[in-house]
Amino acid sequence: MPELPEVETIRRSLMPCIGATISAVDVWQRHLRRPLDPNALRSLAGQRIDCLSRQGKYLIFALSNEQVLLVHFGMSGTLRIAAAEAVKKDHDHLQIVLADGRRLVLNDPRRFGLVWAGRLHDAKEIDRLGPDALSDDFTPEHLHHALRRSGRAIRNVLLDQRVVAGVGNIYANEALFLAGLRPGRRAQRLKRSDATRLYEALRTTLNEAIAAGGSSIADFHDGNGQLGYFQLRFRVYDREGQPCVACGQLIQRVLLTGRSSFFCPRCQR
Ligand SMILES: [Zn+2]
């Protein structure tokens, strides 16, 4: 599932489209998390792409008419730059045709993605987000404060996009391993020093994954790539029953609100 690093990798791969003008939008398959609105999308024709930013797991294209195009990749989405002559693939939902013939193509086999055009302040999804996990607004104090107020398991607080935007189950588990904290511990019991360690572990984990993803951009543009998805060898995620990379103890799995968490019983307390 695309989390912050994968979305950031996609964002970087799309930077060559900044400054280009949209000449048309073709919707092939409307069915996503919310049905695509072909009229709203077609109205983007004639607009220039001025800027491409990211907030959590959302990509935000800022357009010359002061509207935005918001894209969320759900469980399995990607957006790629395709040459004019490239053929359509299975699960391609829409294409944004640029004036120079290149196309931005959204592919989403599991169809949980979201594509929406409008004014940024009308985008409820963005309004509800907490600070981006790699932004200056996300600080150790912010994390500690959020943890202190919550009776939930730490892992679940990290997944709450209103607390911090961009972290999903994979990188939450990886960061908790680096910080030496068990995913199921009650958040409000964490000390300030624990929260600071967790904050640093999150930043490290996300930045490592972005660095790994960056190396896959060239492959992706050649049409071979998965764009950084699962490029990393995870330290703990999905490694139940395998030896801990630090101490050799077997990694355990626990279900927290229905989703798996993985931890080393010796390294994580
Ligand atoms: Zn261990």
Image: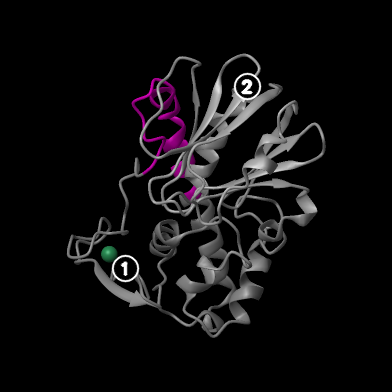
Question: Can residue 188 be seen here?
Answer: yes
- Residue 254: x and y in percent read 30, 75
Magenta stretch encompasses residue 216: yes
Residue at which label 1 appears: 263
Count neighbours of disc 1 (C-alpha within 10 A) and say few if under 14, some if 14 to 19, many if 20 or more.
many
Left or right: 214 in relation to 89: right
Colouring convention used in this rendered image of the protein = one colour
On whether ligand 1 comes within 8 Å of the CB at mark 1, the answer is: no
- Mark nearest the camera among 1 and 2 is 2
Q: Quadrant of ligand 1?
A: bottom left
- Along the line of sight, which residue is nearer the eye, 227 or 144? 227
Can you tell which quarter of the image residue 248 is in?
bottom left
Can you tell which quarter of the image residue 185 is in?
bottom left
Question: Can residue 207 be seen here?
Answer: no
User: What's the residue at 48%, 73% (across, down)?
Assistant: 156
- Along the line of sight, which residue is nearer the eye, 232 or 166? 166
User: What's the residue at 35%, 36% (across, down)?
Assistant: 90
User: What's the residue at 40%, 22% (across, down)?
Assistant: 87
Q: What's under tag 2, amino acid-wise?
A: Leu
Q: CA distance from mark 1 to mark 2?
A: 46 Å
- Along the line of sight, which residue is nearer the eye, 138 or 130? 130
Work out which quarter of the rendered image holds the C terminus and state it: bottom left
Residue at which label 2 appears: 98
Can you tell which quarter of the image residue 247 is in?
bottom left
Q: Circle 1 sits in a helix, a strand or a loop, which is it?
A: strand
In magenta, the rendered stretch is 206-229
Q: Residue furthest right?
A: 65
Q: Is residue 75 above or below residue 153?
A: above
